Image: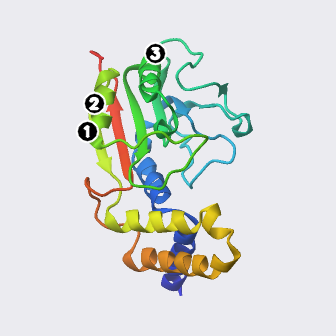
Amino acid sequence: MIKQANCWAQLRHLVMISYRRWYIDRWLKKNQNAMAGRVLDIGGKKSNPRGEFRPPKENCLRWDYVNIDPSTNPEFLCTGDSIPLENERIDCALLCEVLEHVEKPLDILRETHRLLRPEGVLLLTMPFLVPVHADPCDFHRWTDSMLKQALLESGFGEISVEPMGGLVPVISDIVRGWTESQYFRNKPVRRKIYRLFVDLTHLLRFVLSPNPLSSRIITTGWGVVAKKTSLG
């Protein structure tokens, strides 16, 4: 009975979220030990957060949010390239699924570097092979090489870039995004086809498990850990 309940719980979980979001939640949990001292969540949502990951409170002296949307209830209602804090005030910064939505991502990285204390840690995620999703705009898809170059140019060191998922997650999320798009879903004659694609996608994800091998060639995106070194 316990195994059956766990099976159904996993199925319900997979139906509700994308592979991309599942990987982000898992990656954040794996790196939560770095979320200590004063944490700045740039682009995060204090109200109505995405995904299931929630900030760990035990190691954090303070957790502040930066967002341009007042409905998310941020501590700093501003853009990520001009945050009203003095230099070197942050121990850990998060940039989760943010850089693809800004026109000048290097400005965000430089501002984050300015705010971090020496040896401070940046936790960054960025999508790669996922559908276009404007929030309010969608500008970029970077390779791991571009991420490393941009971080180095912004002053960071000790950079680790991890792929998140391989072929199956990419196919699943692309099909899911297509069938759940407003254009496709709102055509009455196509609703049955839409439902069929959604069901097949969910079945594919459940049967093949949410943890197929990750790949640097075909991946949903990246998880990056970078440090502001004493020389940065």
Image x and y of residue 3, in percent: 48, 83
Answer with the quarter of the image where residue 179 lies: bottom right
Assign a secondary structure to mark 1: helix
Mark 2 vs mark 3, foreground winner is 2
Q: Residue type at mark 2?
A: Gln
In the depicted view, which residue is nearer to us: 38 or 208? 208
Find out whether the residues at labels 2 and 1 contact each other: C-beta distance under 8 Å: yes
Q: Residue furthest bottom?
A: 1
Q: Residue at x 53, y 34 (%)?
A: 60
Vertical relation: 101 (above or below) 181: above
Give, as a three-letter code, the residue at label 1. Answer: Ser
Q: Which residue is identified by label 3?
A: 88
Q: Return the x and y of residue 178 as percentages of the image width and height.
A: 53, 65
State the residue position of label 1: 145
Q: Residues within 10 Å of mark 3 (few under 14, many from 20)?
A: some
Look at 53% across and 88% down and name the residue there: 1
**Disc 3, SS:** loop
Q: Earlier in the sequence, mark 2 or mark 3?
A: 3
Residue 177 in the image: state x and y as whole percent.
53, 63
Q: Nearer the viewer, residue 131 or 97?
A: 131
**Marks 3 and 1: CB-CB under 8 Å?**
no
The residue carrying mark 2 is 149
Locate residue 11, reporting x and y percent. Answer: 53, 76
